[in-house]
Amino acid sequence: MNKQHWLVVSILVMMLDLSACTPTRVNRQVDLVASPKDWRHAPGIRTVSDPDDLKAWWKGFHDPLLNGLIGQALVNNHDLRIAIAHVREAKAMTTVAESMLYPSIDLFVSGGREKKIDRVIGVPNNQGIGLFIPAADMITGGLAARWEVDLFGARRLEAEAATAQAEGAEEALHATQVGLLAQVATNYLELRGVQARTGILRENIKIQQERLRTLQAFNRTGLINQLDIARQETLLHTTEGALPALTSTAVNLMHRLAILMGESPEKMENQLASADPFPANSPTIPRLLPSGLLEQRPDLRLAQTEVSAMAASLGAARADLFPKVVLSASGGFGALAVGGFPSLAESVYTLGSGLTVPIFNAGRIRARIIAADARLEQVAAKYEKTFLLALEDVENAYVAYAASVEQRDRLLQAETAAEQTYRFANALYHRGASDYLSVLDAERGKLATADERVKAETAVRVALVSIYRAFGGGWKAGVTLQ
């Protein structure tokens, strides 16, 4: 190898080393608010949850129907299908960006036939003798290569930005999955609560009707006047008026679940029309330290990837200030055949290089750098805000859970008292110490308390789902839906 070849190789090695250093890289660190050591409103139960325990939290309800609904949603939900397609697109664009780091090699072939007439001899009257050139067949072909040497890391940083965007697409998919599972469970539990309340309301209506018949019997014997009957009719019709609202709410919840399942609204009505009881069990109360949110919540992980992508994009924009070097080479063959003469063929090759240095562009490059820097500041601020919202989300979920549990416990006590009242009234009635209306009123009061208790039971379960959603439960690291 002669000195010129050694010089070329040395220059290429130096350029590759410089490219690997990526001198325009931007290291942007986001200073998050100091994470609290523990949750202020966490319940007294100190159950430290492993992140893996959060991935299938809904199974803690031990409800086969709920498990089936969530399984169907994970397969058919349209938002998940859109998010999966975004992941595929982002990964493909990563391959496109990474391909710019390598030379491109193309195969080229061209050919044709040429025939022309040249006027070669002039004569009077502007006429001449035409000389016919025989037809010529030409063909060329070979390989052409081109490579832009990534001296200052522009292409490398663009590839890193594309990789971060692909990772962000996966985190967006995880966030969609977390929200979907919470929606399915919440709507299912609310549906069971509405159906239970509907059953209680129907019992209440029966009691109101029985009370009206009793009052009408008393009126016929002259024991009460028409005013008492009118009051009871008003109460009965008011109670009956609440039934259509509950029925409509139940149907709407079924329709919402159908959409989440990727089904038409009416398909879920037959499957969910029966008023099954609440799930007998509930998942344990999750508890993850605030610092664990950075790894568990997909929206925080997504915000991290956005910062990384924008930092890489800013570095790539800065690289436009520096020179660009392009190396090219081509080699192949050419053949020419004229008339009946033997064809002429030869091998050809070219080597080339080019250097471009920005001199004047009316501030375009600087403006792109400023815009990229502004976008980086935006996503950094968004990351900080997302972390604060995550802390708020968990604290609010704990507060809602504690309030609903306290309300349910008080209503359970009230329901116990209402049950005792009913038993006492019934006992007095059978001993002749009280009238039948007192028994009906006590039973109506018991049902009204039961209705409030069911609402509180629903709120407890929904709040528990909100806690799991706030912790980012419902997905597993390293697993991407396909």
Image (cartoon, helix red, strand yellow):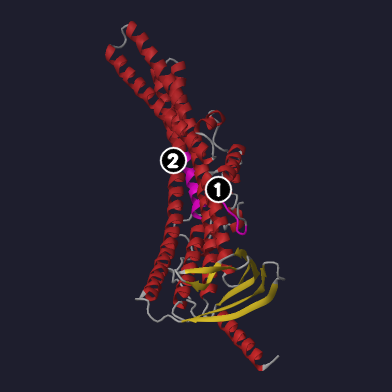
* 271 in relation to 320, above or below: above
Q: Look at the numbered discs 1 and 2 and tell me whether their residues touch, using CB distance below 8 Å.
A: no
> Which residue: 48% across, 74% down?
316
Residue 386 pos. (x, y %): 43, 61
Q: Amino acid at mark 1?
A: Arg
Quadrant containing the N terminus in the rendered view: bottom right
* 377 in relation to 355, above or below: above
Q: Work out whether mark 1 precedes mark 2 in sequence or the reverse, and give the earlier one.
A: 1
Which disc, if any, is residue 410?
2
Q: Nearer the viewer, residue 279 or 162?
A: 162
Residue 376 pos. (x, y %): 42, 69
* Residue 14, quarter of picture: bottom right
Residue 437 pos. (x, y %): 39, 18
Please report the bounds of the magenta region as a residue range.
456-478
> Which residue: 45% across, 71% down?
30
* Residue 446, quarter of picture: top left
Cα–Cα span, label 1 and label 2: 44 Å
**Taking the image as drawn, is residue 163 in sight?**
yes
Q: Amino acid at mark 2?
A: Arg
Secondary structure at numbered mark 2: helix
Neighbour tally class for label 2: few under 14, some 14-19, many 20 plus, Cα within 10 Å: some
Residue 46 pos. (x, y %): 54, 57
Q: Which residue is mark 1?
A: 81
Secondary structure at numbered mark 1: helix
* Residue 225, quarter of picture: top left
> Which residue: 70% across, 70% down?
341
For residue 240, side relative to residue 84 (left or right): left
Q: Nearer the viewer, residue 454 or 440?
A: 454
